[in-house]
């Protein structure tokens, strides 16, 4: 089966083929789309995190003051409704943004720097994270994204950094409080060097001390550096000394920059990009190429994306990856534009978001700070496949409501030149039209990239 | 990280014959050829359960000072177990099991993993049964799967991973099933064989479909949330049927902050899972051993936010009608100066794999040499800690 470069560009580097948008012609077209996408406003600009934090605080305070009154309950219900709208807008952005490759890149970095929303309140905050912290930095340098993430109140909350207090700081001594090393560990293990990296427990501890002071201003709802909870330095991380004297935020930034430029970070991220975009076991030549470009450019991300797209290995092994559930659902939206019809109703939005939960990948709720698994085997389990079939059936019934729509045409459009004879046969032989649509969406070629 | 998983093994042609071919989608399963009546449930507690909080060494004179907001006394948030250890209040539903001799713990245990205190490496090490301190293993299959491979009559439905979560512990060459009771069925009743046709050439999809068709039979469906109760309910159902081994996981144990509050929910799910298994297994409970394991323990001292950070020595829980319980097993290392591992964690005085190994040996009848040679290569099983009656 010879699949065209245009199809590969759409499926492997985007969210698949769609009825009303032409696929990128080739790799160059993929790259061309990025810079324009970076400056195009979101289709629906979400409320800033700052306002969300303030709103949350107000409702909580009102509850404390007045108890769980009808008014408080109504405010909380409204927050949850708004969150559902935000989550849905997020999916629509993925499906309709000007560059699907750009959206995929955003999704990659949001997963790399996972924040997971646990509980209804965190869920209310989560939709602001990617637009504020990830998107503005995906076309810049890795160090800038790392520094931005480290200042994000979402991340500081998620990995407990807001609660970490230098035991030797003014506040630490007065209140007998101490460190929380959660964020420091994940910063080394997940965000930069990787778990096989050259760091020790002592580096974790020292970095945790260095990070004290990074905190959230609850009143204003933003990042704040608090020298009075910062551990007096200097601290030594990976053999380099930072701080000493009056605690200052730029001492931390220096350490983050050094970590961002560490050669082991380049290797870790080169591999991770190759795994995400090309294969669970990627070609070592591709990893080496990405690592070299990353190192040569000091982590200049657009040049790394160009290196990814220009390497022949990125176009080989097509179909080796399975779309994760969120990718699958967005692909369905791209192919069907279903969100335009059913997304207008509360129930329609609810159904699509529920499907993501059933598929075991609810939005902004990764099981841990390492994000979602990449391996095909983690997703195409009996229960995972059954959930895909259930969603495909639901969508199939929706599509069949249009009496003029033919599942065979749909399969040709959605699968393009990846359509196999077996799938064409099954779609054509389906006894009901809805089942024909469902089989096209359940086909291996629709679920692989 | 890449894993040699069951399905990669299948696609490499190692196990196709025993799984895909044995379960053509249209054929109903025949429940037969059971490997005995003994049942084993392994619960993986993801996120590092704090053993020092669950089973508190209130009799250790150094304990209370390490844990200003977490340490409790018998009668005041703690149920006394043996005059030295006490059980966290959230596990109170398990006290009848303790009194009936159907519950025991092994304290100050850990896998050999001592590297980065990484959850993800720690869980991999736990599920692979790795013997190296960096968590690495020469193999990529789970230890429960290797044990399954030693049982001659084992087949797809003999061992089942329950829940949506991927269970590395059951990955490997031996055929094993997986299913989540919360999934609804959709298209799967493939009366015309169209799905079979659709997946004919794709081993990954084909195998998943075949297993789904086989294992969904006992699924009640309807329940949306994977709680301890839902997972245990389905587990009991498959164990009352043809299955003899089941594994599932319960998360929520990563209590870095406000632990007194954060423990309540995961503890409730674990306690409910165990009591549900007891209630639903009925007479089969007498033949059942439940082992709950976690990747590592947590720091002996509270951290700066009334929680605990990643540590080393932890706890294993054993429950079931087959258990010779009412005991806290293990060698207590103490909590004084110099007793802690790297001056921060409870010292692990025993390899937790010994308990898993003895569970397989004394409960399921696997030979010690098979366990030391195949299931946990390189492990010294040592003397029998006396887990089962």
Image (cartoon, coloured by chain):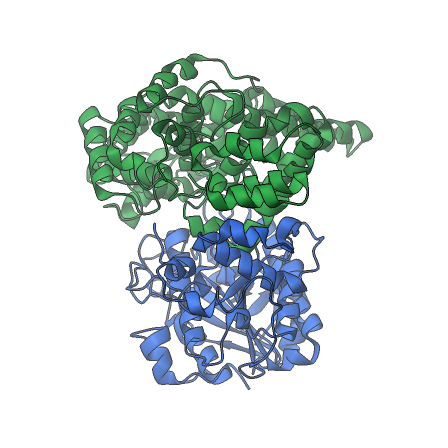
Chain colours: A green, B blue
Which residue sits at x=32%, y=42%?
Answer: A317
Which residue sits at x=31%, y=20%?
Answer: A28
Total numbered labels: 0
Q: Which image quarter holds the C terminus of chain A? A: top left
Which residue sits at x=44%, y=52%?
Answer: B201
Tell me if A140 is positioned left or right of B324 in this view. Answer: left
Q: Percent position (x, y) of residue A318?
A: 36, 39
Q: Percent position (x, y) of residue A280?
A: 35, 46
Q: Residue furthest right?
A: A70
In front of the other: A137 or B65: A137
Tell me if A119 is positioned left or right of B3 in this view. Answer: right
Q: Is residue B204 above or below residue A160?
A: below
- Residue A358 appears in the figure: no
Q: Percent position (x, y) of residue A345?
A: 72, 26
User: Which quarter of the picture shows residue B77?
Assistant: bottom right
Q: Which image quarter holds the N terminus of chain A? A: top left
Q: Percent position (x, y) of residue B4?
A: 35, 58
Which residue sits at x=41%, y=17%?
Answer: A38
- Residue B316 appears in the figure: yes
Q: Is residue B179 above or below residue B155?
A: above
In front of the other: B249 or A303: A303
In front of the other: A237 or A91: A91
Tell me if A412 is positioned left or right of A113 in this view. Answer: right
Tell me if B259 is positioned left or right of A304 in this view. Answer: right
User: Which quarter of the picture shows residue A240?
Assistant: top left
Q: Is residue A402 above or below residue A34?
A: below
């Amino acid at each position: 089966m010879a699949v065209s470069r245009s199809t590969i560009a759409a499926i492997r580097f985007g969210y698949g083929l769609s009825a009303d948008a032409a696929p990128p012609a080739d790799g160059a077209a993929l790259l061309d789309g990025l810079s324009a996408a970076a400056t195009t406003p979101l289709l629906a600009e979400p409320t800033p995190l700052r306002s969300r934090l303030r709103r949350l605080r107000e409702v909580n305070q009102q509850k404390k003051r007045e108890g769980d009154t009808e008014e408080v309950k109504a405010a909380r219900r409204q927050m949850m409704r708004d969150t559902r709208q935000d989550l849905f807008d997020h999916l629509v952005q993925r499906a309709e943004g000007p560059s699907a490759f750009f959206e995929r890149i955003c999704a990659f970095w949001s997963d790399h720097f996972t924040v997971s929303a646990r509980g209804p309140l965190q869920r209310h905050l989560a939709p602001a994270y990617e637009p504020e912290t990830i998107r503005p930095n995906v076309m810049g340098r890795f160090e800038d994204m790392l520094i931005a993430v480290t200042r994000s109140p979402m991340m500081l909350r998620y990995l407990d950094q807001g609660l970490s207090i230098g035991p030797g700081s003014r506040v630490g001594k007065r209140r007998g409080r101490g460190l929380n090393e959660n964020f420091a560990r994940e910063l080394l293990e997940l965000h930069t060097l990787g778990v096989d990296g050259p760091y020790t427990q002592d580096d974790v501890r020292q970095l945790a001390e260095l990070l004290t002071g990074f905190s959230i201003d609850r009143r204003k709802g933003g990042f704040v550096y608090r020298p009075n909870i910062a551990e007096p330095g200097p601290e030594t991380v990976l053999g380099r000394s930072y701080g000493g004297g009056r605690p200052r935020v730029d001492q931390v930034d220096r350490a983050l920059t050094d970590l961002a430029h560490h050669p082991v970070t380049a290797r870790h991220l080169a591999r991770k990009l190759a795994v995400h975009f090309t294969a669970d076991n990627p070609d070592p030549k591709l990893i080496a190429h990405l690592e070299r470009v990353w190192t040569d450019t000091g982590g200049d991300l657009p040049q790394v994306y160009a290196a990814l797209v220009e390497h022949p290995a990125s176009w080989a092994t097509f179909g080796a990856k399975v779309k994760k559930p969120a990718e699958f659902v967005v692909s369905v939206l791209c192919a069907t534009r279903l969100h335009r019809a059913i997304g207008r109703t509360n129930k329609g939005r609810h159904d699509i978001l529920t499907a993501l939960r059933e598929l075991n990948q609810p939005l902004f709720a990764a099981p841990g700070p390492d994000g979602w698994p990449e391996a095909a085997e983690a997703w195409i389990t009996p229960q995972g496949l059954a959930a895909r079939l259930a969603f495909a059936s639901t969508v199939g019934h929706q599509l069949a409501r249009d009496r003029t729509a033919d599942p065979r045409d749909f399969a040709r459009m959605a699968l393009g030149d990846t359509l196999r004879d077996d799938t064409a046969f099954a779609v054509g032989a389906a006894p009901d039209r809805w089942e024909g649509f469902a089989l096209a969406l359940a086909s291996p070629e629709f679920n692989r990239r | 990280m890449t894993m040699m998983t069951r399905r990669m093994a299948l696609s490499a042609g190692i196990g196709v014959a025993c799984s895909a071919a044995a379960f053509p989608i249209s054929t109903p399963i025949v429940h037969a050829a059971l490997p005995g009546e003994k049942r084993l449930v392994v619960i993986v507690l993801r996120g590092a359960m704090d053993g020092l909080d669950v089973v508190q060494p209130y009799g250790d004179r150094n304990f209370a000072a390490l844990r200003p907001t977490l340490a409790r006394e018998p009668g005041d948030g703690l149920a006394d177990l043996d005059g030295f250890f006490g059980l966290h209040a959230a596990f109170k539903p398990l006290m009848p099991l303790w009194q009936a001799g159907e519950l025991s713990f092994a304290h100050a245990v850990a896998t050999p993993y001592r590297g980065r205190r990484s959850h993800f490496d720690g869980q991999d090490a736990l599920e692979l049964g790795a013997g190296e301190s960096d968590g690495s293993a020469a193999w990529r299959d789970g230890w429960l799967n290797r044990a399954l491979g030693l049982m001659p009559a084992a087949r797809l439905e003999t061992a089942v991973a329950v829940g949506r979560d991927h269970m590395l512990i059951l990955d490997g060459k031996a055929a094993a099933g997986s299913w989540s009771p919360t999934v609804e069925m959709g298209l799967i009743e493939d009366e015309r064989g169209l799905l079979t046709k659709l997946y004919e050439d794709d081993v990954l999809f084909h195998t998943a479909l075949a297993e789904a068709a086989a294992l969904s039979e006992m699924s009640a469906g309807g329940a949306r949330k994977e709680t301890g109760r839902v997972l245990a309910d389905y587990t009991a159902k498959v164990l009352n049927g043809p299955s003899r081994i089941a594994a599932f996981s319960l998360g929520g144990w990563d209590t870095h902050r406000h632990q007194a509050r954060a423990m309540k929910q995961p503890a409730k799910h674990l306690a409910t899972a165990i009591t549900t298994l007891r209630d639903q297994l009925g007479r089969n409970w007498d033949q059942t051993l439940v082992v709950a394991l976690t990747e590592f323990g947590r720091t002996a001292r509270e951290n700066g936010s009334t929680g605990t950070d990643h540590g080393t020595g932890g706890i294993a829980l054993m429950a079931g009608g087959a258990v010779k319980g009412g005991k806290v097993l293990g060698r207590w290392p103490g909590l004084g100066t110099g007793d802690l591992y790297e001056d921060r964690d409870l010292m692990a005085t025993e390899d937790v794999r010994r308990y898993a190994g003895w569970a397989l040996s004394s409960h399921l009848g696997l030979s010690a040499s098979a366990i030391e040679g195949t299931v946990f290569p390189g492990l010294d099983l040592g003397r029998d800690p006396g887990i089962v009656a």
